[in-house]
Image (cartoon, helix red, strand yellow):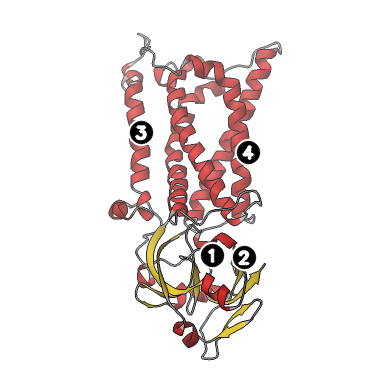
Amino acid sequence: MPTEKSFPSPLHHPRVATVIGRWLGVAVVICFLTGLYSHFQQDTPSWLPIPSRPATLYRVTQGLHVLTGTVAVPLLLAKLWTVYPKLFAKLPWPPSRKAIETMLERASILVLVSAMALELVTGFLNTLQWYPWPFPFRQTHYALAWIIVGALIVHIAVKLPLIRANWRRIAEIVPNSLPPAISGLTRRGLFRTVAGAAALVGITSVGQSVPALGPVAVLAPRKPNIGPQGLPVNRTAEAAGVTGIGPDWRFTVTGPRSLELSLDELQQLPQSRSALPIACVEGWSQGGRWEGVRIRDLLELCGAPAHSRVRVVSMEKGGFYATSELPEQFAADPLTLLALRLNGSQLALDHGFPARIIAPNRPGVLQTKWVHRLEVIT
């Protein structure tokens, strides 16, 4: 049975674990904060109104969320490799304060590693839109994030003296007895290898949200410029149960004065343009040139107050996002459109023909397609 002393390599030194832990900590913090922002976009608390500007903010935050989650994978593996000899350390006996601290540390590590592994695996599968589990992804992903934060705080509190002792650079400590096979890779070499692996994973995946890196995005699950009208489609019209639009289609607005308009009548209203991206929770984003009627103009036509909220109703059959809500700051924003055209041509059916919502700083799942009714909420 091996013991902790069976692993004398300096690559398992606490200094190594501290350095890689700092990198992993930065990735986890950014991933957590951007994930929290994404969650609040869909479940907005009353005390935190989401602004409509900057228009591309969600594109940046969700791109960072998926990027840091992806980069965290090699960092977590490297961190686990540096500290795994600790698994073979014997618990102090008889029971003492030191034994309790050790048991608490191991329990926090078990929870932390298990939650992070599940979070990263399910998050990656979400980018592929593959959900081989019975539980709801978004709510579970959110709950796991808080478990990770709690376990991380406990872990840091227990290890704080060791972290402090190894925070600053120290001289290389390489036992003279180390065989060449173990001492061949220095700590500096390990740091470069881990940093290079994380950078490589990041560069080859971030192209799904950074067009300039699109040609090298070999690990990205989505090419953001491939799809109808140069824009990807997550949910097709067939999958949504929208098989076609008949000539009797009508768009309605329920408010102080209800409106009912045909597609031709919508096209006769004053048209506006917005250059906005579709930014999806899976991390990909792509800009488009949209044309249509401003939501605030439709509210004015039906006599609704300027501060009104709007419920958007799709022709989609079921699904979590068959309806959405535009808070007042989004409904009043001049960039928010009932879009009828994309990149110079009529909307493709898979992009929401005959009409869809496009608004600044919103997740793609809330840019509702196949809209046939707006309900004013005052």
**Callout 4 amino acid:** Ile
Q: Residue at x 47, y 87 (%)?
A: 264
Residue 224 shows in the view: yes
Q: Earlier in the sequence, mark 1 or mark 4?
A: 4
Drawn side of residue 160 relative to residue 95, left or right: left
Percent from the top left, x then y, of residue 193? Answer: 33, 31
Q: CA distance from mark 3 to mark 2?
A: 47 Å
**Callout 3 amino acid:** Ala
Contact between labelled residues 2 and 1, with CB atoms less than 8 Å apart = no
Q: Is residue 105 above or below residue 341?
A: above
**Closer to the observer: label 3 or label 1?**
1
- Secondary-structure class at tag 3: helix
Q: Which mark is residue 309?
A: 2
The residue that mark 3 highlights is: 195
The residue that mark 1 highlights is: 332
Q: CA distance from mark 1 to mark 2?
A: 9 Å
Choose between 125 and 341: the one closer to the eye. Answer: 341
Percent from the top left, x then y, of residue 319? Answer: 61, 68
